[in-house]
Image (cartoon, grey):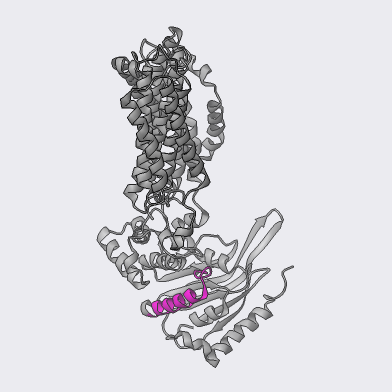
Amino acid sequence: MNVNNRSSVISVDNLSLTFETRDGPVHALSDIDLDVQDGDFVSLIGPSGCGKTTLLRVIADLEQATGGSMLVNGVTPAEARINRAYGYVFQAASLYPWRTIANNIALPLEIMGVDSATRKQRIEDNLALVNLTDFGKKYPWQLSGGMQQRASIARALAVEPDLLLMDEPFGALDEIVRDHLNEQLLSLWAKTNKTVVFVTHSIPEAVYLSTHIVVMSPRPGRIHDVIVSDLPRERSLDIRETPEFLKLANRVRDGLRAGHSYDEAV
Amino acid sequence: MVNAAKPIFSRIERILIIAAGLSAVLGLTGLIVQGNLDGRLTVAGAVIVLSVYLGHQIIVKSRWSCGTLFTLASLLATVILLEKLAPGSAKETSPHGWGYWFLVIAAWLIAWAAVEQFASIRTLSTAVQWFLRLLIPLLFGSWLLLGWEFVTRGLDVPQVLLPAPSVIAERFGNSMPILWADFKQTFLKAVLIGYAIGCGAGFIVAILIDRSPFLQRGLLPIGNLVSALPIVGVAPIMVMWFGFDWPSKAAVVIVMTFFPMLVNTVAGLAASNAMQRDLMKTYAASYWQTLFKLRLPEALPFIFNALKINSTLALIGAIVAEFFGTPIVGMGFRISTEVGRMNVDMVWAEIAVAAVAGSLFYGVLALLERLFTFWHPSMRNSGHA
């Protein structure tokens, strides 16, 4: 596997997670095996209820697995969280309304005890990275939804994590903004060579962004297939018109269908 | 050109102005018929009627000038009325006849029309908005007082029932040292100290409760019980425990303010949503970091709510507590003794002190709230954005 001498960032072995509810146990995740290598862009795709967000939350130690094992950077997810191994981008921007955009980006840095000079530098760098340089002094509620989400990405990047976990970060945005942010995210990833785990339910988004597409299926949540993309690392939005892209998208769609993702929920 | 087609007067404005002008004419006629208007005041009366007519004409062009004109006209009417009420005027020979009452109605209607004009001014300038926000309640409030004056004196209402504002003001001016001593005793000592301790304790206990589920189950129900205690029952007991002086009143205030603060802070600390807390968790933030950087800011609107509720509760509590034993100073003491001596004007003077102090207290808190929770959706429209 390690042809390029790359190391495993996340390795999941026979992981399962069962929620105990009043209506009996719910198998959110079962038999999950996954290996994410340094520098990968891995998308988790599947219908709602397939456990893709839950899997991401287990990686982030926001949920705990009930069976199997998982290592993040070679340690347990809990230790990795304490080591501040990752940056997490939620479905909503979740910026604090009493802080300016710049101070929102400073929040994790303050918590991690980064000194103020470094803090200032990182705010500036990351605002520039997401094209929000002139908006540092604004409050979140003065910005559009797309700008807020960009600010939340800048906040996650400001801690300079090697691993970026993103939970449908562009799900609530319109398609035009979404295309634009996808393009920016990809160039960011190419520039910084981070490892990204990205949850989505959009096939074009998954194919456009990823090096690996993990197709998941529901009831119980499990991995149906892992598709390795043969698209080049450098991609423009135009690539979505090419036969290679469409072929990959079809494979993903077939995978979802074979995993009964298109069946009516019972 | 398009604007010209728009109806400029609202129906209410039209009715208001016609009624105001009519009452002014009727009132002045009444005063003249009763031989009650000398030359000087006749001129003033003519100016009033003219102003209303002119205001009616210029209302289209500028609500500012119209409002100002109406204010002046109303002021003139007030001057005439006060002249009629002044001691030594022709009051004895002619009791307040229909002329007087029509003029009162006219002055009131004209003032109403003036407020109506100012209230319908739309402007983007913040300074002007602030000015109007002060001016309108000021005009409205002063007319409330004047109306009170004209009615109580015009009808010769017995002082024990309702003294005229001028009588209260006179008593107020003559009793400054007593009022100040009472204010010091009740407000500066009992209210402020009790308020600070009560709110502070409520806040600290809320944080302790947040930390410990044991306290949450044990203390909250007891707090609930304490808040349900009737103040008239608590006050005499506090007097027995802490003596006649202000500490017993402060203790009553503490009992009254503690629980609203506790409940609101507990609710406020629970106000942050799951995603915000997850975010802090991904940063591996400590309990205190999460508290100070997320949960307390999120709780601020709740805390200010409690501070505002408590500001009025504290004043009521301290005044009522003084009914149950006190040294011979304090606002509650003064109210209860002066009522017994039929000095109702002094009671009203104390009420005025309490009202002004309470409003200022509340106002300062509201300003602080605006300063600290400007980001909250309920505050965003005013000022910042």
B275 to the left or right of B373: right
Percent across and percent down for residue B270 are 51, 46
Q: Quadrant of residue B3?
A: bottom left
Q: At 34% across and 43% down in the image, what residue appears?
A: B131
Visible residue check, residue B212: yes
Q: Residue furthest left?
A: A117
Quadrant assignment for the C terminus of chain B: bottom left
As rendered, which of B139 and A167 lies closer to the eye?
B139
- Secondary structure, magenta segment, majority class: helix
Q: Quadrant of residue B53?
A: top left
Visible residue check, residue A38: no
Q: Residue furthest top?
A: B341
Q: At 34% across and 56% down in the image, what residue appears?
A: A110
Asked if residue A15 lies in the magenta stretch, the reply is no
B128 to the left or right of A11: left
As rendered, which of A64 and A111 lies closer to the eye?
A111
Q: Residue furthest right?
A: A266
So how many labels did they put on this image? 0
Q: Looking at the picture, does residue A154 appear above or below residue B61?
A: below
Percent across and percent down for residue B304 are 43, 40
Boundaries of the magenta span: A168-190
Q: Looking at the picture, does residue B100 appear above or below residue B139?
A: above
Q: Looking at the picture, does residue B221 appear above or below residue B384?
A: above
Asked if residue A182 lies in the magenta stretch, the reply is yes
Q: At 54% across and 23% down in the image, what residue appears?
A: B229
Q: Quadrant of residue B74?
A: top left
Q: At 37% across and 71% down in the image, what residue appears?
A: A130
Quadrant assignment for the N terminus of chain B: bottom left
Percent across and percent down for residue A140 are 41, 60
As rendered, which of B165 and A99 lies closer to the eye?
B165
